[in-house]
Image (cartoon, rainbow, N blue to C red):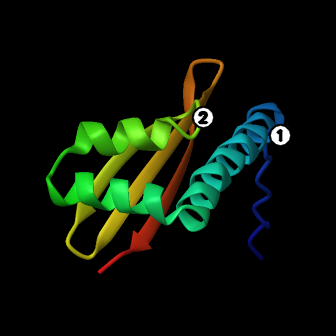
C-alpha cells in the first residue's frame, strides 16, 4: 500500500499581506475622493471630459490630482469612458493596484 504524501508547508508571515491591505484602504479612500468630486461637481466632470476629448492626458491627470489625492494615478480614456489606475507601494515594493472604469458615452 502506498504511503500518503504529506507536504510540509512553510510558516506563513502575514506582514506584507496586512501592509498591502492597509495600503489598499488608503487607495480606496483616495479613489473615493475623486469619485465624490466627479459626482458632486458637474463643472469638474465637464472639465475632465473636455480635456479628455481634446486628448490632453496631462490636463486630465492634473485635474484629478487637484482633488488632493497623493497616490499615483495613471489615466487612460476613449470615447466610451475613462480608466483610472491607482497604485501604491509598501516599503518600496509595488503592492497594490486599484482600477476604476467609468463610462461617459
Quadrant where the N terminus lies?
A: bottom right
Q: Residue furthest bottom?
A: 105
Can residue 13 be seen at all in this image of the molecule?
no
Viewer-nearest residue: 78 or 46: 46
The percent coordinates of residue 62 (x first, y second) are 38, 35
Dot 2 falls on a residue whose secondary structure is loop
**Residue at x-position 56% and y-position 41%:** 67
Give the residue pinned by disc 1.
Answer: 12
- Would residue 104 be found to the left or right of residue 88 on screen? left
Q: How many neighbours does mark 1 have within 10 angstroms: few (below 14), some (14-19), or many (20 or more)?
A: few
Looking at this view, is 6 or 17 the one in front? Answer: 17
- Asked if 100 appears above or below 61 in the picture, the reply is below
Q: Position of residue 78 (x, y in %)?
A: 21, 66
Looking at the rendered structure, the secondary structure element under dot 1 is loop
**What is the distance, in whole Å, between disc 1 and disc 2 at their CAs?**
37 Å
Res. 68 mark: 2
Q: Which mark is residue 97?
A: none
**Residue 2 in view, yes or no:** yes
The residue under the point 58% across, 67% down is: 39
Looking at the picture, how far across and down is residue 32, in whole percent? 66, 55
Q: Residue at x 35, y 76 (%)?
A: 104
Residue 47 placement: quadrant: bottom left
On screen, residue 39 versus residue 102, left or right, reads right
Amino acid at each position: 500500500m502506498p504511503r500518503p504524501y504529506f507536504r510540509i508547508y512553510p510558516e506563513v508571515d502575514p506582514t506584507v499581506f496586512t501592509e498591502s491591505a492597509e495600503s489598499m484602504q488608503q487607495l480606496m479612500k483616495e479613489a473615493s475622493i475623486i469619485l465624490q468630486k466627479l459626482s458632486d461637481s458637474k463643472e469638474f466632470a465637464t472639465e475632465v471630459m473636455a480635456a479628455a476629448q481634446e486628448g490632453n492626458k496631462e490636463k486630465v491627470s492634473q485635474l484629478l490630482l487637484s482633488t488632493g489625492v497623493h497616490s499615483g494615478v495613471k489615466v487612460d480614456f476613449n470615447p466610451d469612458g475613462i480608466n483610472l489606475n491607482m497604485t501604491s507601494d509598501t516599503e518600496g515594493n509595488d503592492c497594490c493596484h486599484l482600477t476604476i472604469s467609468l463610462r461617459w458615452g
